[in-house]
Amino acid sequence: MNSYTNMAAGALLSTVFVMMSVSIASEGLFHAEAPEKPGFAIVAEDAPAEGGAAAAAPAAVPIAQLLASADPAAGATSFKKCASCHSAEPSSPNKVGPGLWSVVNRPIAAHEAFSYSAAIKDFSKGGAEKWDYEHLNHFLAAPKAYIKGTAMGFAGLKNDQERANVIAYLRSLSDSPAPLPDPAAAPPATN
């Protein structure tokens, strides 16, 4: 070996030795114990074992009754959670999610030029299913539980009244809003 190689190897070994010594010394001086209680707990819901619409828990109060007292203005405020991924404009451009102008009673997976996930396409039954109030209610409560495999990463709106307000707001996003369901009528059976 020549002297330059020896000097380079010595410099490298010296640097590693100094770095290890500083690391060991700093760990001894500034050792931090793990907290007894974490600052906050991250709770993830377990998905139901069997997928599809049947796996989603039915709402405690039928959506027709909730819509009777829903406030679209409060829904517009809650819709801000959705606005980063969905458009509410009449031109209804697609963002990460499809545009939602005139979504109530629109066929599922039918918005122009949007690439829907296979799960949504299967759920739509070729366009036979529509975003009626029941589907919107269950989907917005827990998207991944209602339609297994959906690409929608939103956790859902767990509060019944907030969800009804958002659905009332979505209903207002139309040139001719869909009629409200009769609150006295029995809720339809979900598939």
Image (cartoon, grey):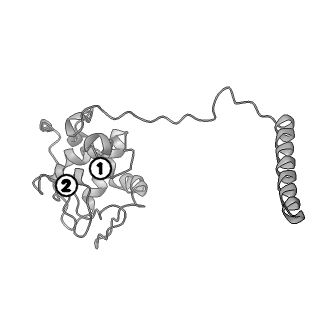
Q: Position of residue 148 (x, y in %)?
A: 27, 43
Q: What residue is shown with label 2?
A: 121
Q: Quadrant of the C terminus?
A: top left
Residues at marks 1 and 2, CA–CA distance in whole angstroms: 9 Å
Q: What residue is shown with label 1?
A: 150
| Residue 90 in view in this figure | yes
Q: Quadrant of the N terminus?
A: bottom right
Name which residue lies at 83% across and 38% down: 30
User: In front here: 161 or 155?
Assistant: 155
Instruction: Identify residue type, mark 2.
Output: Lys
Within 10 Å of the Cα at label 1, are there few (<14), some (14-19), or many (20+) other Cα atoms? some
Name which residue lies at 87% across and 48% down: 18
Q: Position of residue 187 (x, y in %)?
A: 15, 37
Instruction: Identify residue type, mark 1.
Output: Thr
- SS class of the residue under badge 1? loop
Report whether 80 appears left or right of 13: left
Query: Can you say whether 81 is above or below 90 in the image?
Result: above
